[in-house]
Image (cartoon, rainbow, N blue to C red):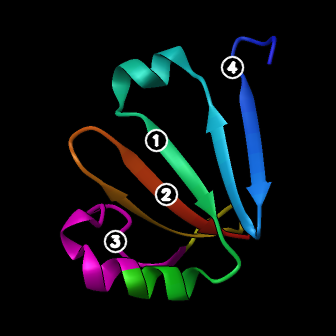
Amino acid sequence: MNTSQPYCVLNKDGIGIMVFQDEQLAKEHNPELRFVTDNIDEVYKIVSTSHSHLLHPNLDKVTLRPWGAKEFAIADNQLGIRFQQW
């Protein structure tokens, strides 16, 4: 926590939340949360069915990223949430 970019991972009952602080990114982008799951396809099905209008246009489907995680994202004008499965 005593660094220029503090980073925390919280895990409970199979759900992980990653939180980091980056002053420059905060100025450029809305705050972002990342949720880690073991079943991203099920999470995507629920979110895309109930809140499809929030799907981020750059990551609106479950996508295998170059770093090996499967991800999709939602966003509004104040907050971004990325869902991730390793």
| Residue span colored magenta | 47-63
Identified by mark 3, the residue type is: Asp
Q: Is residue 78 magenta?
A: no
Residue at image position (30%, 61%) is 56
Tags 2 and 1 in contact by the CB under 8 Å rule? yes
Does 31 sit above or below residue 75? above
| Residue denoted by label 1 | 32
| Mark 2 to mark 1 CA distance (whole Å) | 7 Å
Compare marks 3 and 4 and give the one earlier in the sequence.
4
- The disc, 3 or 2, on the residue closer to the chain's N-terminal end is 3
- Is disc 3 placed on a helix, strand or loop? loop
- Would you place residue 24 above or below residue 9 in this image? above
Helix, strand or loop under label 2 = strand
Q: Mark 2: give few (<14), some (14-19) or many (20+) Cα within 10 Å.
A: some
Q: Which mark is residue 82?
A: 2
Res 74 → quadrant: bottom left
Which mark is on residue 5? 4
Q: Residue at x 34, y 42 (%)?
A: 79
In the rendered view, does 68 fall on the left or right side of 43?
A: right
Q: In the rendering, at what x and y percent does residue 20 appear?
A: 64, 31
Compare marks 1 and 4 and give the one earlier in the sequence.
4
Q: Which secondary structure, mark 1?
A: strand
Per the image, the residue denoted by label 3 is: 60
